[in-house]
Image (spheres, rainbow, N blue to C red):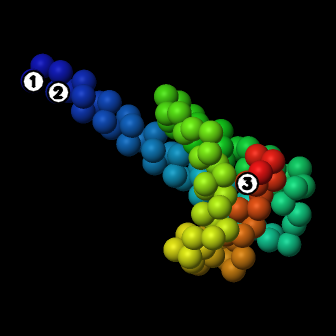
Amino acid sequence: MAKFPELMEQMYSMKDKVNSYVDRSDELMKRLTADLSRDVSCEEIQRIIGELIAEGSACQPDVDLGDGYWGMIADGYLSSPAMIEATDKKYGAGASAFIGNALKKYWKL
């Protein structure tokens, strides 16, 4: 029971970190999908993708996502009906394909 205050502090710190990541990630996704007519290989789009990846890594620095993780995520944006529907609803029609293709370009998949 003596460690309870310390554990609670760690929990609140983690919650703040996750909330910050979610806010920053949403901001970056809005920038990424602001103009879906852009070329996914352009420097600005690839920079935003890099920022999204860096934010995720910073939020969970001790997590090894494995070799195929980003390919799986890109494929999800391109082929998962649920992911496509949710992404396009939030960021506009075609946003999911745009994000999936931008990730594939970034990772050279």
- In the drawing, what numbered circle is on residue 1? 1
Q: Quadrant of residue 87?
A: bottom right
Q: Give neighbour class at mark 2: few <14, some 14-19, many 20+ (Cα, 10 Å).
A: few
Q: Nearer the viewer, residue 109 or 91?
A: 109
Relative horizontal placement of residue 71, taking residue 60 as reference (left or right): right
**Residue 63 position within the rendered picture, expressed as x and y whole percent measured from the top left:** 49, 33
Residue under pointer 3: 103
**Residue type (three-letter) at the residue carrying disc 1:** Met
Residue under pointer 2: 4
**Residue 65 position within the rendered picture, expressed as x and y whole percent measured from the top left:** 55, 39
Q: Choose the circle earlier in sequence order: 2 or 3.
A: 2
Q: Nearer the viewer, residue 53 or 71?
A: 71
From mark 2 to mark 3, how far is it between C-alphas?
42 Å
Whether residue 106 is visible here, answered yes or no, is no
**Residue 70 position within the rendered picture, expressed as x and y whole percent measured from the top left:** 64, 48
Q: Residue at x 52, y 52 (%)?
A: 22
Q: Is residue 6 above or below residue 80?
A: above
**Residue type (three-letter) at the residue carrying disc 3:** Leu
Relative horizontal placement of residue 76, taking residue 12 as reference (left or right): right
Callouts 1 and 2 close, C-beta under 8 Å: yes
